[in-house]
Amino acid sequence: MTSLSICKFSTLFTLLLITPFLGRTQDRNITSKVDSLLSIMTLDEKIGQLNQYSVGAELTGPGSKEGQDSIRYEHLKNGQVGSVLNLVGAKETADLQRFVMENSRLKIPMLFAYDVIHGYKTMFPIPLGESASWNLELMQETAAAAAKEAAAAGIHWTFAPMIDVSVDPRWGRVMEGGGEDPYLNSVIGVARIKGFQGESLSDPFTIAACAKHFAGYGYGEAGMDYNNVIVNRETLLNQIIPPFKAAADAGVATFMNAFNDIDGIPSTANQYLQRKLLRGDWGFEGVMVSDWNSIGEIMSHGVAKDLKDAARQAILAGSDIDMEASAYVNHLKELVEEGTVSIDLIDEAVRRVLYLKYELGLFDNPYAYSDEAREKEVILSEEMMALSKRAALESMVLLKNENQLLPLDPSKKTAVIGPLAKDKDSPLGNWRAKAESNSAVSLWEALEKRNFKALTHEEGCKLSVGKNNFFEVLTIEEEDRSSFASAIEAAKSSEQVIMVLGETAFMSGEGRSRSSIELAGLQKELLKAVYEVNQNIVLVLMNGRPLALSWEDEHIPAILETWHLGHMGAEAIADVLLGEYNPHGKLPISFPRATGQIPVQYNHKTTGRPNTQGGQVFFTHHNDIERTALYPFGFGLSYSTFEYSDFKINATEMTASGSIKASIVVKNSSDIDGYEVVQLYLQDVVGSVTRPVKELKGFERVKLKAGESKTISFEITEDQLKFYRANETFGSEPGEFRVFIGPHSAIDEYLSFELIDDRLKN
Ligand code: NOJ
C-alpha cells in the first residue's frame, strides 16, 4: 500500500470510528434467558447480583477489609456477590469462579472487574499522553491489546475509559483521560471502547468497557480530587456529557457514576443524570456501577442520613451495582419488604447484570477467560512490546526546538542529567494495573545503547519518599542539593545536555492533586544551575499532567513532552532525540503559563469584556500574565515544518439540510517526511446561551513527504452546529458561524458562513 492510500484508509477508518452506531440492540434470546433465571431467584440472590466486593490484596479505594473476610466469604458462598474487582490472574479467577459455581444455589458465574487503564501487564502511554497522538486507530489497538492480556488473566470488565473532560491540570486524574475537549474525548472514548469490547463481548479476547465517571468529576473545585463540582446546567450539557453520549451511542456495556455532586445531588443519587439523561433521553440499557463506596459517600455528602437511606437513593437514581459500600447487600431487602423500594426496580437492575454475564458468554463457560496457557503466551509478548513502543513514538509532543537543537548530534559530548533519567519506574505511570515496578526501560538504558561518542550521567537531584503524602510514594527531593555540584560539572564539560525532569508516576493519578504545577522539588533550581554553565539543553519532560513552564520556555532551547510513556517509552524517546523518528503529537490539553492562571482551556466563553478598549484595564484578564495558554490545545511541533495556504469555504450560506466544504492546502516545507494533525474549529457567533470562542469539530492526521502539498477538506453539516440551547433542547440556531483550520487551537484567521433559518430542527 502506498503511503497515500494508507492515509486515505486511515481517514475512512477515522470516520467509521466516530460514526455512532446507536447503542447495542438487546438480544431477545438473552432477554428471555434472563427472565427465566430471574423468575427462580430469591430476593437475596437478586440483591447479591448487585453487590460488588474488592477481593485480593489490592485496595483501589479507602478502607480496610480487616474483620470483613468471614462475612464476604459467606456472601460469596451464598451467591450474594455478583462481581468482584481487583482479583486477577487466570488461576486466581478460575479458583474463585469454581468456588462460586460449586457452592452457590443457582451457580450464576461471577464477573471479574479491574482497572485496566493503559495496559494490564504491558504498559502503554498513560491515556492523556496517548491522546496526544490524535491517532484513533492506535488507541483502539492499544485498548484491544490491553483487553487481550487482561482477558487471558480472567478479567471480564475494565473500568475504562475515563472520559471526563478535564480542565484543571492540578487534578491528578487528568493523566487518565483525553484532556480538555469534549469532541476529542468523545472520539477517543469511542475508539477505546471499540478496542476493549471488539466486535463481540462473547469473544474471550475482549472485555466489557465502562464509561466513567458520570458526571462532572473533572471539574472538582481547585482541581482537588473528590471535591464538589459547581458547574451550571449549560456547562454540564455542552461540555461534560458529550463524551458520555458518544459512549452510549457506541454501545459501551457499562457506565460508572462519580464521587462528586451535580446541582447539589451526589452523582450516585442523581436521578436527573442517570434516569433522565442516560436511561431516558439516551436509552442506555447497560449496567451502571457505583464508584468505590460512592453509595456510602452519599452520607458523607450530607444527603443521606444513614446507609439504608443512601441505598434507597442510589437504587432509585439508577445505580445498579454497589461497589464496596455493602449498602445494597445490607439494606435493599428491608427497603423492598417495607415497600419503600419496589421489586421492579431491583429486577430491572439485576436484569442488566445478568444480561451482561450472558453477553460475555459466562453462562456457556464461566472459565473461558481464565486461561493460564494464553496468559503466558500473550502477556508481555514481543508483539505487546512493539505496540508499546509504537504508541510511545506517536504520543510525544515537541514543545520547542530553537535553532534545531534537536535531533541531537551523537558525536557531541553529552551529559544526561536529572532524577528521572535512570528511573525505571516512573515511565510506567500511575494506574499501572499489574505492571511490575521498575520494569520499564529507563532513558539512560536506551541512550547508552545508541552510538553517542561520549555520554555521562548525573542525577543532579534525587528521588525521595514524599514527606507531605499520606502514602509513601517516590517523589522528587526538596532539600538535598548534594548531587548538584557533580551535575553542574558534567554539564560544564559537555557540549550538550539532556535534562530529564518531571514527575514520578505517583505524583499524578487518583488522589494526587497538586496546588502548584511547576517542576516539583529541586528540579527547577537544578535546571537553572545547569543553564548557567551550558545552554544547549534539551529538556525531556516525564509527567502525568500539564506543567507550568514559563521560565523553561523562555530559556531552554528544546523541550520534548514525553508524559509517562509505558514500558518502551525510553526507546521511543531515544529515537526522537536522535532523529530516527519525527515527532508529531499535539497537546490534548492546554499548558498554562502559571498555576494561578488555571483554567486556561481554549474553548472558553467570550465574556462580556473580552478585549481591552483604549488600553484600559477593564477587561477579562490577569494583570500580571498574558491571557493565553503557554502551549495551547492542539499544539505540537515536528522536525518537519508545515505551511497552510489557500483556505476556502465553498459557500457562505448553508441550510440545515445542506453542508459546507472547508478546505486548506497544507505543505510540508521541510526536507523531512512528517505527519501533521490538521484541525477544524468552529465558532457559533451568537447563541441563545454564551458559546465558546472556538470548538474542535474535526481533525485529520495527514502524512506529507518532504516538499509535498495536499488539500485537506472538511464537510460541515448541521450536526456539528448543534448544542443544548437556552431551553435545554438540543439543536442548532441560525446565524453566523466562523470556520478556523490550522495546526492548533490558537489560530485567528477565519471564514464565515450563515446558517439559514429555512427549517429549524429541534
Ligand atoms: C475509584 C476510582 O474513582 C474509579 O475510577 C475506579 O475504577 C475504582 N476506584 C475502582 O478501582
Image (cartoon, rainbow, N blue to C red):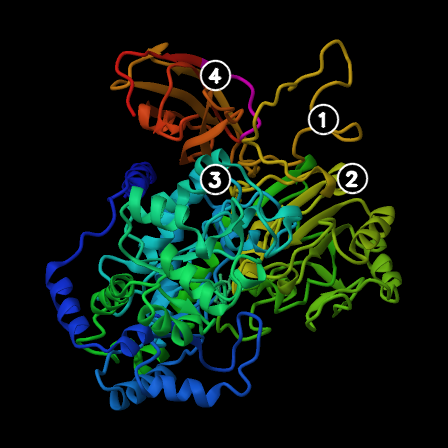
Q: Quick one: label 2, few (<14), some, or many (20+) residues within 10 Å? A: few
| Dominant SS in magenta | loop
| SS of the residue under disc 3 | helix
- Residue 61 magenta: no
Q: Earlier in the sequence, mark 4 or mark 3?
A: 3
Please, is residue 415 above or below residue 361 in the view? Answer: above
Question: Closer to the camera, 548 or 68?
Answer: 68
Please, is residue 240 above or below residue 603 in the view? Answer: below
Mark 2 residue type? His
Question: Given this view, does label 4 or label 3 mark the residue nearer the observer?
Answer: 3
Mark 3 residue type? Leu
Distance from label 4 to label 3 (Cα)?
A: 20 Å
Q: Earlier in the sequence, mark 1 or mark 2?
A: 2
Please name the residue shown 73% across and 55% down the image: 414
| SS of the residue under disc 4 | loop
Question: Given this view, does label 4 or label 1 mark the residue nearer the observer?
Answer: 4
Q: Which residue is mark 2?
A: 555
Distance from label 2 to label 4 (Cα)?
A: 41 Å
Instruction: Describe residue 132's horizontal placement relative to residue 660 as left or right.
Output: right
Q: Quick one: label 3, few (<14), some, or many (20+) residues within 10 Å? A: some
Distance from label 4 to label 1 (Cα)?
A: 22 Å
Question: Closer to the camera, 183 or 748?
Answer: 183
Please, is residue 265 above or below residue 85 in the view? Answer: above
Q: Position of residue 26 (x, y in %)?
A: 17, 55
The residue stretch that appears in magenta = 745-751
Q: Quick one: label 4, few (<14), some, or many (20+) residues within 10 Å? A: few
Please, is residue 117 above or below residue 362 in the view? Answer: above
